[in-house]
Amino acid sequence: MITTETKLKRWDSVPFTSVKIWDKFWRPKLEQIRRVTVPLALDQCEKANRGDLVPGLAAWPETEFPGTCGRDDSAVCQAVEGTAYTLMLQRDAELESRLDALIDETAAARERGGTYAEGALGPWIEAAVAYCEVTGKRALLDAVCRWADRAEARFDRGLRPGTAGR
């Protein structure tokens, strides 16, 4: 007799980069996301030039927050992760090139700023891991590792009292 437990033991996880979707229902929708939605999201990130927000975060919270909310660069982060998942389904040299430029701009802005909103670190790590898994490129992953080191040092030195863990 096959029990539910026995059935579950036969299931095994697979890396998301190994998943291929070719059916007649989802594949056309995913193609439209690759051809229309992702380029539009990247256009909006470039148009808003959200990377320029990041240097102002170096002085926060001692000065007024430079953005509209605590996660103002989340649109860039979401665009990076979404584009990575799209590239997983089909590599696209033009999208990848645009994303590389956005990643370079964002990473450079954060490096110039010296810090960033610690609350947004988790989503950036997820985006960096996804992009590295899909493309093999470590630029964003290496950058978020540096950001995590800086955030950890700030918490260790008690520079942000009242934040999580304090």
Image (tube, grey):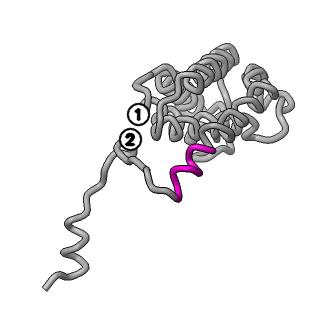
Which residue is at a point 83% across and 29% down the rendered structure image?
66
Mark 2 belongs to which amino acid? Thr
Q: Which mark is residue 17?
A: 2
Measured as percent of width and height from the top left, residue 34 is found at 59, 39
Where does the image place residue 65, in percent across and percent down from the top left? 83, 33
Q: Nearer the viewer, residue 162 or 70?
A: 70
* Kind of residue indicated by mark 1: Glu
Q: Distance between the residues labelled 2 and 1?
A: 7 Å
Q: Is residue 77 left or right of residue 15?
A: right
* Mark count: 2
Q: Is residue 97 visible?
A: yes
Which is more toward the observer, 117 or 127? Answer: 127
In the rendered image, residue 2, in percent from the top left (x then y), is placed at 16, 81
Label 1: which secondary element: helix
Going 63% across and 37% down the picture, which residue do you hit?
A: 35
Check disc 1 and report the residue beneath it: 133
Q: Are marks 2 and 1 in contact (CB under 8 Å)?
A: yes
Disc number for residue 61: none
